[in-house]
Amino acid sequence: MRIIVCLLFLIANISITTAQVKVGDMIPSIPLQSNGNSEVNISSFKGKYILIDFWASWCGPCRLGNKKLVKLHNEVSSSKIEIIGISIDTDANKWLKAIERDKIKFTQLIDPKGFEANAALLFGVDELPAKYLFNPEGILIAKNPTEEEIIKLIKD
Amino acid sequence: MKRINKVYVMLALMILMFTMKSNAQIVKAEIRATGLTCSMCSNAINKQLKALPEVISVETDLNTNTFTVTLKEVNELNPKVFKEKVEKAGFFIGSLVVTAKSETITKSPYILVGKNSGTGSEVQFQVVDKGYVTDKEFKKVSKSYKDIATYLADNEDDFHIKILN
């Protein structure tokens, strides 16, 4: 009995720790709906740097962050880095309106289930905004880097 | 036969105990959280509340920044639990509106301020103690309740409540 309890505990622990992308981990394969109404897999951009930004239209700090990301998108070559916004908005219309208002031209995907969204759970997103930078090999190299750090990291 | 009677008496007593309990408890709590950062942008409050075994569901309203917590039929929670959980998540309570069985507020630790309750089976009230309203609101209400000695004493185990229904 004790062994079973210990095993269960171990399994529970493992499933908790694996439900979170850590530095050094490979980018997970998650197909999501884009604002262009097509299915896009975040792992399909391997070969260049990938910046994933979790946000939502109702999240004030994220909307401010969008401005910075738009600027970054204009400054760095898209052959060097792919910026991907993943919204956890439950209302897709609000998401689309926010994209328009914030003048976002980079890839936009949605997982419309709030913090319960599969992508948010897989990445271990507990707070918005949340950024993840992967290198061209698809390995996570930084969590929540600033725009300056991103520019520096992708130059090296 | 005697043994069966005993069992019945025990059962009846247990049912009585549970029904008595269920007349004095919180059914629902609506928590508006505040803080230095966007409270809805964090999943922490949600997680803290959901970790309570008495909690059935936590719903969030993004327009009003409110967490609505629905509780199990039998529970002995009081407002302090919500304050502790919200603060543990790194935020503060901006307002706490509780829906409870009417009987709940006839007992301590609840102290009524303002008008009396309605006659319904459920009562809705706001906790007006320090830490359950914004600092600004607290300054305002503490002036109007300056004659209530227990309010000024700021005992964290009694709750001054304003009936809303």
Image: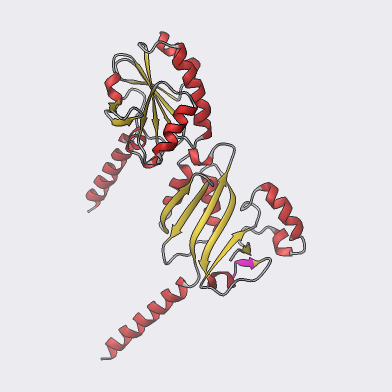
Q: Looking at the image, is B117 positioned above or below residue B37?
A: below
Q: Is residue B42 left or right of residue A86?
A: right
Quarter occupied by the C terminus of chain B = bottom right
Residue at the location (44% across, 16% down)?
A73
Residue in view at x 50 percent, y 15 percent? A148
Quarter assignment of residue A29: top left
Please name the residue shown 36% across and 29% down the image. Answer: A35
Magenta-span inclusion, residue A37:
no
Q: Position of residue A82 (x, y in %)?
A: 36, 18
Image height of B149 relative to A123, above or below: below
The color scheme shown is: secondary structure
SS assignment for the magenta stretch, majority: loop
Q: Where residue B44 sits in the image (x, y, percent)?
A: 47, 42
The answer to whether residue B107 is visible is no
Asked which quadrant contains residue B152, the reply is bottom right
Locate the N terminus of chain B by quadrant: bottom left
The vertical placement of B135 against B146, above or below, is: above
- The stretch in magenta equals B107-111
Residue B90 visible somewhere in the drawing: yes
Residue B110 covered by magenta stretch:
yes
- Residue displayed at 66% across by 53% down: B130
Q: Considering depth in this image, is B34 or B157 the residue closer to the camera?
A: B34
Residue B86: x and y, percent? Answer: 53, 48
Residue farthest toward the bottom in the current orientation of the protein? B1
How many marks are shown on the rendered structure? 0
What x and y, as percent, mark residue A51?
Answer: 39, 21
Which residue is the extreme one toward the top?
Answer: A156
